[in-house]
């Protein structure tokens, strides 16, 4: 039993359910017996976890734009959700430079529309609002960012996530911060995640896998950039644990932001990550697995690390996987998808969630025991 079974038979809205993180969250909630209702504008990539694992057949799904406030409100009113996980966003920095208005509309006003839909609900509902580590004003220092640090952002994506945080905060203080409020919420901030089934543009792991599948060496732009890599299940365990804590009445977390990131010793370079993943890929024809080049065309923030003491203190949340396991989970998933044709990928993905839960239990992580 994970998360004290609080999601069993509950109605859970997941926005962005056709995306990478939303699909993993949907599978985990479905496995725990939740009735998932998805809202997404489209399936963002081909292939996608949503289509490959036929998630649309396992849940109620609405193709809707979160910028359409009335339509979103109606779905919320009809569903009467017990929980909401808001992940829908334009999440790519390079796309935000190409189309800042679309990014701001979706990430800021779309988030406001979700909060407005929560505001009209009459039933009790716990909401987890997903932003990003990039919501912080990145001053390129060596310390981890704390929840009390300033939000902000130089690129349009980061600015949109900082602005989303302000919108969440104002809705909490203006409408939900009352003892008898039926809405309880948290804002959650995590960084780069990796894992099987991501095919988004300009993300290093999907780029790498697509190159290897074509028997090409992967072109690496910034091989020695360090990132705090974490498997997608790590922040998801934090989101679920925060929702559980809200459901179980931990009043002191209501309205609070939380960081969910890997331990500091899990920082590794891009090259180290790709080498670790390559250990789990069946190479057929290439000797050179990596081609290092240098052509960054837009400003990319450097080191950005999260301080996760608050999640540890209030939620007893900790990451589960060490770096090598993160790389194994990721590499093995893609290798199974591309090189072991005929595998039931839904069952395989569920088996990775089971292994993750078991690993957490063995480490006495609070949500798994
Ligand atoms: N993947 C990461 O490394 C990462 C890191 C930090 C934060 N995040 C955040 O996590 C969330 C999920 O990211 P992801 O990587 O799964 O993204 P993704 O691109 O895989 O999925 C995005 C989802 O949002 C939906 N969406 C986009 N615009 C929409 C709109 N206007 N209306 C309705 N739905 C819309 C898409 O249809 C899709 O379901 C996002 O909020 C993102 O900013 C992701």
Image (tube, rainbow, N blue to C red):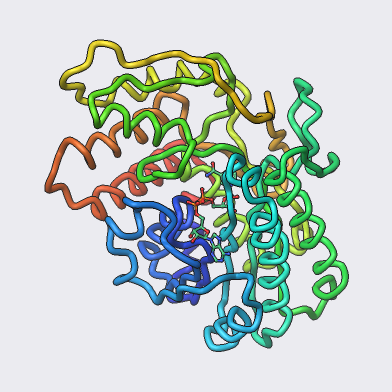
- Seen in the picture, residue 161 relative to 143 is either above or below; the reply is below
The location of residue 68, given as percent across then percent down, is 62, 76
Q: Position of residue 104 (x, y in %)?
A: 70, 56
Q: Which corner quadrant of the image does residue 97 belong to?
A: top right
Identity of the residue furthest to the top in this view: 287
Q: Is residue 301 left or right of residue 95?
A: right
Q: Residue at x 52, y 49 (%)?
A: 237
Q: Residue at x 40, y 77 (%)?
A: 60
Horizontal relation, residue 81 to residue 123: left or right: left
Quick one: 310 or 327, which is closer to the camera?
Answer: 327
Q: Locate ligand 1 by image quadrant.
A: bottom right
Residue reaching furthest left? 342
Which x, y percent locates residue 255? 78, 61
Comparing 278 with 261, the one in front is: 278
Residue 225 locus on image (x, y percent): 58, 19
> Quadrant location of residue 304?
top right
Q: Count up the numbered dots.
A: 0
Side of 3 where 28 appears, left or right: left
Left or right of 284 in this view: 234: right
Note whether residue 1 is visible: no
The residue at 76%/64% (across/down) is 251
Q: Is residue 304 above or below residue 222?
A: below
């Amino acid at each position: 039993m994970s998360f004290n079974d609080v999601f069993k038979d509950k109605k859970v809205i997941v926005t962005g359910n056709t995306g990478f993180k939303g699909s993993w969250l949907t599978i985990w909630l479905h496995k725990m017996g939740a009735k998932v209702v998805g809202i997404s504008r489209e399936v963002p990539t081909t292939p996608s976890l949503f289509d490959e694992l036929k998630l649309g057949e396992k849940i109620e799904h609405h193709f809707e734009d979160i910028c359409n406030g009335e339509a979103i409100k109606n779905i919320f009113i009809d569903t009467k959700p017990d929980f909401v996980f808001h992940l829908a966003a334009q999440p790519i920095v390079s796309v935000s430079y190409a189309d800042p208005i679309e990014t701001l509309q979706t990430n800021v006003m779309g988030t406001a529309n979700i909060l407005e839909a929560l505001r009209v609900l009459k039933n009790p509902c716990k909401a987890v609002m997903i932003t990003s580590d990039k919501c912080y004003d990145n001053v390129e220092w060596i310390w981890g960012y704390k929840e009390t640090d300033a939000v902000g952002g130089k690129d349009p994506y980061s600015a949109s996530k900082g602005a989303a945080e302000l919108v969440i905060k104002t809705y909490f203080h203006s409408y939900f911060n009352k003892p008898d409020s039926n809405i309880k919420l948290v804002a959650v901030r995590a960084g780069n995640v990796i894992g099987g089934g991501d095919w988004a543009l300009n993300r290093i792991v999907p780029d790498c896998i697509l190159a290897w599948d074509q028997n090409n060496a992967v072109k690496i732009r910034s091989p020695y950039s360090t990132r705090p890599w974490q498997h997608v299940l790590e922040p998801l365990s934090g989101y679920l644990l925060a929702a559980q804590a809200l459901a179980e009445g931990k009043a002191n977390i209501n309205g609070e932001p939380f960081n969910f990131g890997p331990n500091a010793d899990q920082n590794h370079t891009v090259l180290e990550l790709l080498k670790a993943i390559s250990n789990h890929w069946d190479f057929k024809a290439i000797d050179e697995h990596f081609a290092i080049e240098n052509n960054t065309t837009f400003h990319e923030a450097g080191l950005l690390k999260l301080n996760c003491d608050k999640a540890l203190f209030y939620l007893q949340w900790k990451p589960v996987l060490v770096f090598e396991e993160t790389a194994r989970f990721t590499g093995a998933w893609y290798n199974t998808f591309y090189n072991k044709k005929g595998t039931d990928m839904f069952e395989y993905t569920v088996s990775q969630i089971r292994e993750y839960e078991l690993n957490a239990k063995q480490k006495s992580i609070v949500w798994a025991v």
